[in-house]
Amino acid sequence: MLVKNVTLALNEKTLREARRIAAGRSTSLNAMIREFLEDLTRRESGAAQARRRIVEMCRESRAEVGPREWSRNGLHER
C-alpha cells in the first residue's frame, strides 16, 4: 500500500495535549491520527453503503400504505 505524508497545522496547546495523550497510550501522535482517520473513513463508508442499501430496499419494496384513519388532533387528544 502506498503511504503519503501530509502536513498538519495545530496550535501549540493542542499539539502539546495530543502528544501527552499519545504518550499516555504508548503510541505516537502519527499513529493516533492515522487510526482516527482510518476509523472515520471506515464509518463514513459503512454509512454511505447503508444509505444506498436503504434506497435500494425502498425501490424494491412492494409495501403499500393504507388509508389514513387518524387526524393530527385525534393523536394529540388527552
Image: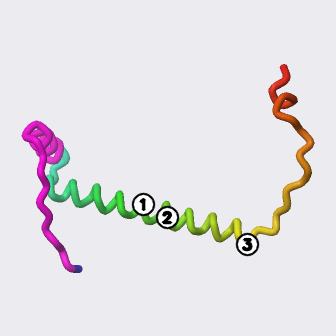
| Secondary-structure class at tag 1 | helix
The N terminus sits in image quarter: bottom left
Q: Residues within 10 Å of mark 1 (few under 14, many from 20)?
A: few
Where is residue 36, by image quadrant? bottom left
Across and down, in percent, residue 7 comes to 11, 60
| Secondary-structure class at tag 3 | helix
Residues rendered magenta in the picture: 2-23
Residue at x 14%, y 53% (from the top left corner):
29
Q: CA distance from mark 1 to mark 3?
A: 24 Å
| Secondary-structure class at tag 2 | helix
Q: Are marks 1 and 2 in contact (CB under 8 Å)?
A: yes
Q: Which residue is mark 2?
A: 48
Across and down, in percent, residue 9 comes to 12, 51
Q: Which residue is mark 1?
A: 44
Residue at x 84%, y 19% (from the top left corner):
78
Across and down, in percent, residue 71 comes to 86, 35
Q: CA distance from mark 3 to mark 2?
A: 18 Å
Q: Residues within 10 Å of mark 3 (few under 14, many from 20)?
A: few
Residue 28 visible? The answer is: no
Q: Is residue 19 left or right of residue 36?
A: left
